[in-house]
Image: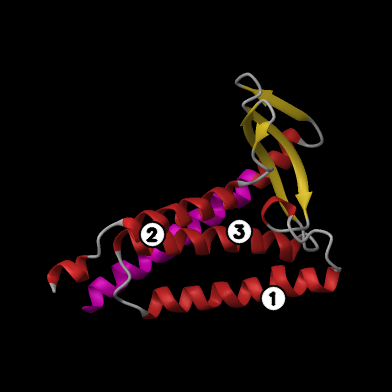
Amino acid sequence: MNKETNIKRLIYIFTVIFVSIIADQLSKVAAQQWIGSDRYSFLGDTLRLGVTENTGAFLGMGSNLDEGIRTAIFIVLTAIFLIGLLAYILINKKVNGLELLSWCLLLGGGLGNLIDRGFRNGHVVDFLNVGIGSLRTGIFNVADMVIMAGAFILIYLSFRPSTHSQKQ
């Protein structure tokens, strides 16, 4: 890769990560300011808005762990993982296209929630819930949606035929 391509790649990586973090953090601030302790329902109760602080991971998993263990897992190990992921996407020049987008989304969403944990005593602000009747998601936030988008792209890519195997 030439220098100009490397610079464009770096700009792309940091733009996706930055936009993901900003969208997440601004949505959390807006939710706290405008929703507060209220609860709202839209589209025939398909979308619910209500701010909550989650001490656990996805769907509150691990929320009843000892605070020291939660900190070690959800802050320290997550930070180490995200640093490793950043190093991977910066060093591995073969990662590009949709795969690069997916890793950047995972990193941006992970950083959005890590920022919450660092500044909110280990808590993450969640405020969205969707579903029909009793079939509902857990309460989540924009960072979670960004992470899921990255994960879905990776899953999609894993089912696509590899271009390397077609060239052999």
Examine the rendered structure and indicate whether residue 1 appears above or below residue 162: below
The residue wearing badge 2 is: 101
**Residue drawn at (66%, 62%), measured in percent from left and top?**
115
Is residue 3 covered in magenta? yes
Which residues, given as a range, are shown in magenta?
1-27
**Residue drawn at (48%, 61%), measured in percent from left and top?**
17
Q: Which mark is residue 136?
A: none
**Residue drawn at (77%, 59%), measured in percent from left and top?**
120
The residue wearing badge 3 is: 112
Examine the rendered structure and indicate whether residue 35 appears above or below residue 94: above
Pinpoint residue 97: horizontal percent, then vertical percent.
Answer: 30, 61
Q: Residue furthest left?
A: 167
Secondary structure, mark 3, is helix
Tell me, yes or no, if residue 6 can be seen here. yes
Q: Are marks 2 and 1 in contact (CB under 8 Å)?
A: no
Secondary structure, mark 2, is helix
Estimate how packed mark 2 is, as few (under 14), some (14 to 19) or many (20 or more) residues with alpha carbons within 10 Å. Answer: many
Q: Nearer the viewer, residue 15 or 158?
A: 158
Pinpoint residue 164: horizontal percent, then vertical percent.
Answer: 21, 71
Q: Sequence-wise, which precedes: disc 2 or disc 1?
A: 1
Quarter-of-image position of residue 114: bottom right
**Amino acid beneath label 1:** Val
The residue wearing badge 1 is: 76
Pinpoint residue 81: horizontal percent, then vertical percent.
Answer: 57, 74
Query: Is 1 placed left or right of 137 in the picture?
Result: left
Quarter-of-image position of residue 159: bottom left
Q: Residue furthest top?
A: 44
**Amino acid beneath label 3:** Gly
